[in-house]
Image: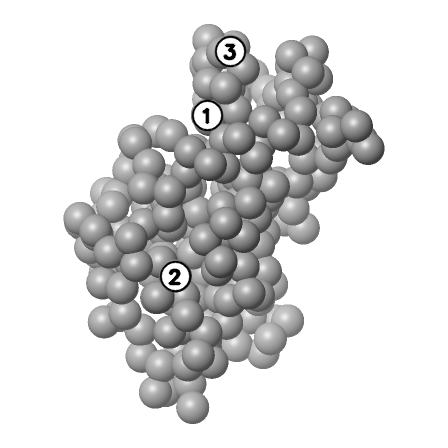
Amino acid sequence: MKAIVFDFDGTLTKSRKGSNCWYEVWKYIDDLEYDNFLYNKYKRKEIDDETWMKLIIKRYREKDVRRVYLHEISKKLELLPGTRETLKKLYENGVKIFVLSGGIKQIIEDVFKRENVDKFITAIETYDLIFDNNGKLINYSRPSLHNLENKNEYIELIKNQYNFKSEDILFVGNGSNDEMVYLSGARTLCINPDDTDPSNKTIWHNQIENCENLSEILKFCDFEKSK
Ligand SMILES: [Mg+2]
């Protein structure tokens, strides 16, 4: 095993069902109804992923979302117990750690800095919000992938970039937007499942139905083979 790729929301964080970085922003600006309205439009395929993102940013700008809001939101997010120790152990055993999330980069980075785990992480692939010098939201930038629904494509990028084979990589996730990963050939582990069926053995090779401490994943990590 040479690399581990984590989903963020509900995988590295303790989160209520359905909660994620975006949900927390909508809640913060007291606009969950509009969030639902856009989400349903997307689900009914009336708007595509990119239009959905543009409409979110438009609304956030109208609501004057500020950089500091993201920092405030990050304070509410707690990492799963044992996260620091587990990431440290993986790092010290030469395993490269990636985070692949449909969330918001600033929130994830603020949580990692606060918990002193940022130094263990090779890369975070997610959406980035762009603010001006006064902390006012201007725009967003996409991750290098066109669509984070296709998380398997990110695994392909890592494989090419670092010269890994599929079996060198373990993916850890919890939701329906992680389901495509198995197509990359990486091993997959579902923890604390949200809107996915962890007993589907094609999609999820292993599962921890109720993972209370991230160190429980270590029994699925074979460092020795990476040496
Ligand atoms: Mg998730």
Question: What residue is shown with label 3?
Answer: 31
Relative height, residue 3 to residue 42 (above, below): below
Left or right: 210 as drawn, with respect to 179: left
Q: What amino acid type should be assigned to the residue bearing mark 2? A: Arg
Q: Quadrant of residue 216?
A: bottom left
Q: Position of residue 33 (x, y in %)?
A: 46, 9
Work out how far the residue at label 1 is from the one at label 3, CA to CA, in angstroms.
10 Å
Question: What residue is shown with label 2?
Answer: 84
* Of the image marks 2 and 1, the number of the one nearer the N terminus: 1
Front-most of residues 168 and 105: 105
Relative height, residue 174 to residue 124 (above, below): above
Q: Quadrant of residue 207?
A: bottom left
Front-most of residues 9 and 159: 9
Q: Position of residue 70 (x, y in %)?
A: 58, 32
Q: Residue at x 17, y 48 (%)?
A: 210
Left or right: 140 as drawn, with respect to 48: right
Q: Is residue 221 visible?
A: yes
- Mark 2 packing: few (<14 Cα in 10 Å), some, or many (20+)? some
Question: What residue is shown with label 1?
Answer: 23
Instruction: Give SS at disc 1.
Output: helix
Q: Quadrant of the C terminus?
A: bottom left
Instruction: Give SS at disc 3.
Output: loop
Q: How many marks?
A: 3
